[in-house]
Amino acid sequence: MNDLVLHEHVTGPRGERVLVRRSARRRRTVSISRREGDLLIAIPATFSARQERQWVTKMVDQLVSKEARRAPARRSDDALLRMAREVSEAHLGGRAHPTSVTWSSRQNQRWGSCTPTDGTIRLSHQLQGMPDYVVRSVMMHELVHLLVPGHGPEFKALMANYPLAEKAQGFLDGVSWAKHLPEHGGEVDGGAEAGDGAAGEAGVEFAEGAGETPAPAQSVQRAR
Ligand SMILES: [Zn+2]
């Protein structure tokens, strides 16, 4: 984008880049919002470098507490099922119909898994708090598996409906690297959660692919 400058001293809570826009029209307000995985902060053009740093720090802190307050809603399984339906609707023409989508604290070696035979999807609780486009990306990956097993051409073609797939994968690769997890975070789940030993098609870890998301969280504050 035109006049966005990378701020070098501060990053977001999950390592997001902070991009600063100096606005000649802005006199006294500073705002922060999320856009495609980055944090966007608008400040008055008249701010000194020191003021910029001070306000960037302040606004990022504020966003973090605001999101922490809102997090419980997103953490519920109900919210997750709603998200799954939205993603299916938006990127798969509503063709994937999960019967349940739940957070799982047992998914430590993979980001998500699904059992196509019964339509269930589980996402690792480790995704909670990650950017929305990343969570949606993992969701998309699992939804596609409800329609297509494996990662062949058909799978890739459906995943391509999710524009931020690669970016989300990069984010997850970075998290895995930092945690020294296996490169692909695991794979395959026969759905044997309750010992039905049989083999569903495969669950699956992560994903590429998230779409959209100029995510909401906006907050504006007066500078003094
Ligand atoms: Zn997969």
Image (tube, helix red, strand yellow):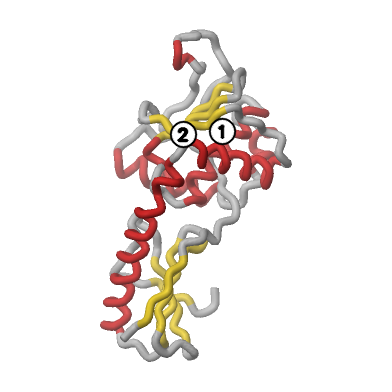
Count the marks: 2
Which one is earlier in the sequence, the residue at label 2 or at label 1?
Answer: 2
Q: Quadrant of residue 175?
A: top left
Q: Secondary structure at mark 1?
A: helix
Q: Position of residue 133 (x, y in %)?
A: 51, 50
Q: Is the C-beta of the residue carrying label 1 under 8 Å from the nearest atom of ligand 1?
A: yes
Pointer 2 and pointer 1: residues touching (CB < 8 Å)?
yes
Residue 34 appears left or right of 93? left
Q: Residue sitting at 45 percent across and 16 percent down?
A: 193
Q: Position of residue 204 (x, y in %)?
A: 51, 28
Q: Residue sitting at 49 percent across and 20 percent down?
A: 189
Q: Secondary structure at mark 2?
A: strand
Which amino acid lies under the numbered mark 2 shown in the image of this protein?
A: Leu
Q: Quadrant of residue 99?
A: top right
* Position above or below: 155 against 26: above
Quarter of the figure with the N terminus: bottom right
Q: Quadrant of residue 144?
A: top right
Which amino acid lies under the numbered mark 1 shown in the image of this protein?
A: Glu
* Position above or below: 136 against 47: above
Q: Position of residue 15 (x, y in %)?
A: 35, 56
